[in-house]
Image (cartoon, grey):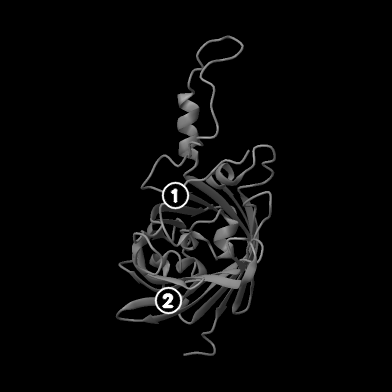
Amino acid sequence: MVSAQSGGNSTYPFLNLVTSARIASMGGDFLAVSDNDLAVAAVNPSLLSPEMKNQLAMQFVDYYTDINYGSVYYSRTFKKIGSFSGGIHYIDYGKFDRTNVGGDIEGTFSASEYAIQVGWGRKLDSNFSIGANLKPVFSYMDGNRSFGLGTDLAGSYHNSKRELTVSLLAKNAGRQISKDAVGELENFPFSMEIGVTKRLKHLPFRYSVIYQHLEKFDLTYADPLVDKPTIDPLTNEAVKEDKIGKFTNKLARHFIVGGEFMPSKNFSVRLGYNYLRRKELGVDTKMSTVGISWGFGLKIKQFQFNYARSANHVAGSPNYISIVANLGEWIN
């Protein structure tokens, strides 16, 4: 049996797909890591900083079947205004057969969606920073087009002495503005997240804890096709509800935990666990490693290469590839 997932009440769900291999390897949502990584700051704009000037982040995800998606971002800094990033997040759903009512193939059609993103971040003082993304979104589905406008808002606290970072992110606040298809205009997949990262004092290890969906506590799904017994067939007595277990299950779905082992400045190994993903996408008869992700990072001069593999389902695990390049030596 497959446990169904919550959702279906918003449009442009591709906006929740993580493109950064580093983020994917640590559970897949966002990160509160202040170490001048544009791929992370594109998702959490409060981490944009002058040190990212002229960085280029390119990311590609080999998703299921012939679906693939990715993103490209570039950063610049202006002293009196702040740091900016610009780029695009896209998904290509591939080609589909167009059939008539009799099932005869009459041709093919394609489907894709794009989010053009402009980000801004600024430090308020030595510890606090804020940021925002503006995201016009375009969708094309077999001649049906739609357009929407969304935004992300973020704030971070960073203590360099304790190597502690805390970020609050409100992402995908927005709505469709127009569409060709019949029906009401829909909202973006809004959510609020809070994240904490801390590097250990005497070990080259950083841990990350994300609490996702602050706006909604109950993320469980009641499947109407699955009847839970109210009477024990052996004792013929009423089955008592496990309130503590039920509450614990709901609470655990909000947490994403990850770790980053850094034996040197140029190499790191990462591991993450997403309980919500495991409960939503796992198959009861074969849970396997669903919800677990891993990856590594390698720095070579001005380039940083990141790879991740995330076990989203027993049917397959997407591969994430990210390259962050510092173009500062070639661009002033």
Cα distance in 3D space between marks 2 and 1: 24 Å
Which amino acid type corresponds to the residue marked 1 in the rendered image? Gln
The percent position of residue 65, horizontal first and vertical second, equals 66, 62
User: Is 84 located above or below residue 150 in the figure?
Assistant: below
The percent position of residue 18, horizontal first and vertical second, equals 53, 62
User: Is 151 located above or below residue 221 in the figure?
Assistant: below
Find out whether the residues at labels 2 and 1 contact each other: C-beta distance under 8 Å. Answer: no
The percent position of residue 151, horizontal first and vertical second, equals 35, 66
- Residue at the (65%, 65%) spot, across then down: 104
**Residue farthest front in this picture:** 102
Which amino acid type corresponds to the residue marked 2 in the rendered image? Ser
Q: Nearer the viewer, residue 45 or 189?
A: 189
Residue denoted by label 1:
212
Give the class, few, some or many, for how many residues have Cα within 10 Å of label 1's Cα (few <14, many ≥20): many
The percent position of residue 289, horizontal first and vertical second, equals 67, 46
Q: Which element type, helix, strand or loop, lies under badge 1?
A: loop
User: Is 169 located above or below residue 251 in the figure?
Assistant: below
Label tally: 2
- Residue at the (57%, 72%) spot, across then down: 110
Q: Is residue 204 visible?
A: no
User: Is 317 located above or below residue 2 in the figure?
Assistant: below
Give the class, few, some or many, for how many residues have Cα within 10 Å of label 2's Cα (few <14, many ≥20): many
Q: Nearer the viewer, residue 171 or 111?
A: 111
Residue 320 quadrant: bottom right
Residue 280 is tagged as none
Which is more N-terminal, label 1 or label 2? 2
Residue 85 is tagged as 2
Q: Give the position of the N terminus as an image quadrant.
A: top right
Residue 53 quadrant: bottom left
Q: Is residue 328 visible?
A: yes
Left or right: where 311 falls relative to 247 = right
Q: Which element type, helix, strand or loop, lies under badge 2?
A: strand
